Image: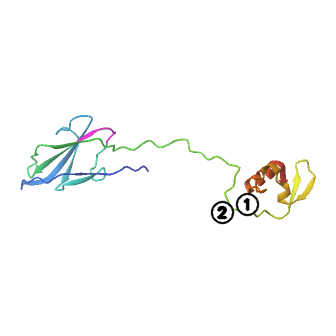
Amino acid sequence: MAKMKKRKLCWKASESQQVVGYRLYWAEGGEVGYNSPFAALGNVTEVVLPDDVNGFSHKGGPIEFGVAAVDELGNESDLATFKAPYQFNIPLAPEGLWIENLDEFHTEGEEPDDEKLPDPITLIAKGGESKVESAASAAPTEAKDEAGSYSSAQLYGHLDNNWKPR
């Protein structure tokens, strides 16, 4: 379900003693008037849009609000109006969601220490001959940095490309 930012529309109460409530009118892209869509609000001086107003719907763009005081006979005051550039609509949802498989793995816990390499490992050369080498001797010499060491990513990248684990 989508969500929309709420807006609170407020006004000062009419000073007339016979007022029993208010009407909220609204118009999109034009002037608000007594022929515009409206909602009877009761004797309140603020509303939260769109929650407090049944039937309030807005397609986007500028909107003009009008509030009229209503007496016990149904007579209405002049409209107090307010133009709002608010967006009371929601954006369209993205489409075409998918997941792609990656060759990498996420490892939980500690990051491997590049200085500590595993003890001897058994490898099978791509041609099928078995070899037992230490991880240090299996690393390509061009992967070493000035200090003569290499990262585990370089080592394992080399192993992935040249050897298969037994």
- Rendered location of residue 156, percent (x, y): 77, 54
Outermost residue to the right: 129
Please provide the residue range marked out in magenta: 58-64
- Amino acid on which the number 1 mark rests in the picture: Asp
Residue at screen point 18% across, 37% down = 35
Q: In this view, does 26 lie to the left or right of 124?
A: left
Q: In this view, does 26 lie to the left or right of 17?
A: right
**Please, what secondary structure does the residue beneath circle 2 have?**
loop
Residue density around tag 2, few if under 14, some if 14–19, many if 20 or more, within 10 Å: few
* Quadrant the C terminus occupies: bottom right
Relative vertical location of residue 73 with respect to residue 31 in this rendering, above or below: below
Q: In this view, does 163 lie to the left or right of 21?
A: right
Mark 1, residue position? 114
The answer to whether residue 134 shows anywhere in this view is: yes
Residue situated in front as seen by the camera: 30 or 38: 30
Residue situated in front as seen by the camera: 55 or 116: 116
Mark 2, residue position? 108
